[in-house]
Every structure is written in structure tokens, then in C-alpha cells.
Image (cartoon, rainbow, N blue to C red):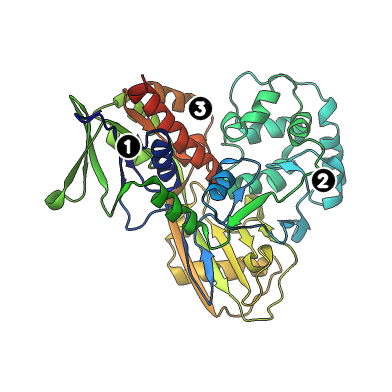
Amino acid sequence: MNERGVSRVAVIGGGISGLAAALRVRDLMPSARITVIEGAGRLGGKLYTDEFAYGRIELGAEAFLVRRPEAKRLADRLGLALDAPATTQASVFTDEALRPLPSRTMLGIPADLTALAQSGVLGPADVAHVNDEPDRPGPLLREDIAVGVLARQRFGNALVDRLMDPLLGGVYAGFADEISVRAALPQLAAKLEHTPSMVVGARSLMGSGVTSGPVFNTVHNGLSALVELVAATSGADIRLGLPARELQRRPDGWRVIVGMSRERQMVEADSVIIACPARPASRLLRSVAPHAAESLAQIEYAGVALVTFALPPGTSLPPGSGVLVPAAAGLDVKAVTFSSQKWGREGTPIIRASLGRFGQERVLARDDDGLAELVIRDLLAMGIKVPTPIATHVQRWGGALPQYFVGHLDRLEQARRALPEGLAIAGAGYDGVGIPACIASGQRAADQILTRRVIR
């Protein structure tokens, strides 16, 4: 604390993780002096709502899971109106056709084998092999392993290539054969320590399948409204357009040097929450926590692009909320959302496509017109013919999605153990990529610094 007994907290990163951390500090210590430092000219990170073609669209994340309570609880606290999807029935493109995504899967791991068979995503022989999985012996989970590698052992290749890979690719822009089961599916991993069956584990976690209420929500006025209200409620001093350049240890706490060299500023703090991606976090920590910096530097990221089209009124689209595209299909688009149908919004039909997988950033090297043409080509390959768009928007997110490779949780634990008192990390690169997980990560970081330094 400073000489007046008021805790000074600096938060580096103005995405939802950093803002949730700032709000948590305010809740736990109302007198704290909180400074949020953001290198961009706006808050929100990958939560970004903007005007487009007679309406507002999300240019980043578009919704949050309800079964994790953090995002909905925060929205309810702030009095934000929420929207539920009008349809959540998606399709998967396989065998040159759009087939219904089976219900009750956990990132492609089926809890309902009947729904899997009826979807037509797998052929009869592959369905029979999956049906036998609950009774198939095998070792219990003792070490971390890629979820795709484990699933191939249990189900064979078809389920991974046609179902799990596009679902995991949608979340991480990565590949099932590289993503850690303990990091991506921690609850399932815990079940697999007691049963070898992935189907049995998924069933026990998903229950009977009878749910009340929507699976997803979004903010009626756009997710940027959530960002703005969290920031305002935190009462933090928001400093935009000031990238954090250096973190220094001081006798009475920490100093963050921000801004360009000619106009640099110094923010003094008792505690610092670093809520930015792993690479810049690693650079900041290099001189004050080298072992933590080394662990964070190993976290890789994938870049993605979102191409949004406004189509002429009356354009006919396939039913449902959108299409997932397996990497095995050989297309560059990995997912398409029929946004206007998904959210039940009349008027201009809106669709958006996602491109970019880890290690395949060459696709994103095209200019905006080239990316739009690529999307039109891939839509045609899926049998979706659209007229010339009346408006197009291309949003690029360089290094947007962290890759939770095997051993991710061990590296993260090593990094956190190596952090000196008064420092904490938060964000999608560490504890989960969804909005609720990011909020929880920020709240956890705030709890850590206040418990370790302020609350005696």
C-alpha cells in the first residue's frame, strides 16, 4: 500500500479479463486506485461491436455459454438485456453435403449415440465402432495427451476428422491432435481418470440432455455494451493507446512504463495484473520473473479473420445457425454463421465466415478482397450460392486464439509459481478462451493479488 493506506492496482490489458479483474478489485477494496492500461485505442479486445449495413454486428466473439455462470451473472448485475439464439441447429460439411450436427456432444465427443447415427456424419461401420466404445477396455488417463490422439484410440479416425476437429477448430483455430485434453476438457479429463470411456465421461457430465433455457446468450445491444459498463462500474482510470513497455520492481511495489519513448508515462502500483496475451506478458516479465516469462513464451497463438457479408433482402440460406467445416474438407473457411437466422433478426440477411487455422496463416496474407473471394468460393463448394453482397467487412485478428498444447496446464502452473508477490496473470491464453472463462480468469487474478498483498 502507499503512504495513505490506499492500494494501487495496475491492470495491463483492457479486454474483458482485465476489466473483470478491475471490477473485482473495486468490489473487494472500494478505496483502491485502479489504473487500466490498454495499448489499443478502445477497450474490449476481441469483444467488438460496430455498425454494419443498417445494423450492428459483432466483429469478434458473438456470444457466451450460459452453463458457465460468470458472463451471465455479470450481465445480470449490470442490468443488460440478453438475447438467446432463435436456432442453434448447425450443420457440418462432410462427404460433399451439409449434415446436421449431432445433438449432445462435448466438442464432438458423443453423449447420444442415436443422434450421432441419425446425423449421417459417420458411415455405418464407423457408427458401429463408436457404439462399442463404452464397453471397450483401455488405460485410465494418467498423463496429459492431445484430445484428438486419445479420441482416435477410442473411436477411430472418422469421428475425429469429421466432428471433433471442426468443433475444436471453431474454438481454438487449432487441431484436435495438438490440443490438450486436460486444458480444453478439464472436467472430462477428471472423469477419464476413473473410466477409459470418453462416451461414459461425456454422458455423466451432460446428464440427461434435458435443459431449461438457452445454451448461449449475447447482449442485446452488443457485447461492447458489456465492456463499457464493466469499465464504468470498476471506476478505474482508463488509459487508452498506451502500450505497456516495461515492468520494474520498486522498493514499495511496481512501476509500469507505458507509451512511446518521447511521451512515456510511469504508473506506480502496489500490485499489477497482466491481462494481455502470453507473448507480450512474457516480454514484460523477462527482467522481473524470467522463469515465468520462459513458460509463457511457449504458448502459441493462431491468427484468424472474420469476413461478414450483408446480402440482398430475400436471399435464401440453408436452415439453421451455420456450418462447421472440417480441415479434411480441404477448404480454407472453417466455419460459417448465418447470423441473421441464428439470432432471429429480420431485414438484411447477414452471414459471416471464419478463416485461419494454426500454422496456416498464409491464407490470411491475402488482401480483403481476396479473402472475400475465397469465402464465396468455399461457400459454392459447400453448395451455398449467395448473390453479390451489398456490403462486406473483413476483420483480422492477428494472434487471436491461444493454442492449448499438451502440457499447457503444467507450463501455466510453473509460470504462476514463478511470479513474485504482487503480480498475477489473466486472460484467454491461460484459463480458457470463452467469455465466461476470461471473466473468471480476471477475477481469480484480482483475488490472488489482494489475498497475497493487501488482505493480511
Q: Which mark is residue 191?
A: none
Could you give the CA–CA distance between mark 3 and mark 2, rounded to whole angstroms? 31 Å
Q: Is residue 167 above or below residue 385?
A: above
Whichever of labels 3 and 2 marks the residue nearer the N terminus, that label is 2
Dot label at residue 409: 3
**Pointer 1 or 2: first along the chain:** 1
Q: Identify the element where label 2 is drawn.
A: helix
Q: Counting other residues with Cα less than 10 Å from the Cα at mark 1, is it few (<14), some (14-19), or many (20 or more)?
A: few
Of 116 and 94, nearer the camera is 116
Q: Nearer the viewer, residue 4 or 388?
A: 4
At horizontal 68% and vertical 59% (from top left) the residue drawn is 85
Asked if one can make out residue 82 in the rendered structure from this viewpoint, the answer is: yes
Q: Name the amino acid type tagged 3.
A: Leu
- Give the spatial CA distance, label 1 vs label 2: 55 Å
Foreground of the two, 406 or 249: 249
To which quarter of the image does residue 176 belong? top right
Q: Position of residue 381 (x, y in %)?
A: 67, 66
Cβ–Cβ below 8 Å for labels 3 and 2?
Answer: no
Which amino acid, mark 2? Leu
**453 sits to left or right of 252:** right
User: Above or below — where is 284 with respect to 315?
Assistant: above
Is residue 298 visible in the rendered image? The answer is: no
Task: Measuring from the top left, give residue 203's x and y in whole percent.
Answer: 78, 33
Q: Residues within 10 Å of mark 3 (few under 14, many from 20)?
A: some
Find disc 1 in the rendering and name its residue.
31
Q: Quadrant of residue 126?
A: top right
Q: Nearer the viewer, mark 3 or mark 2?
A: 3
* Residue situated furthest left in the rendering: 262
Q: Amino acid at mark 1?
A: Ser
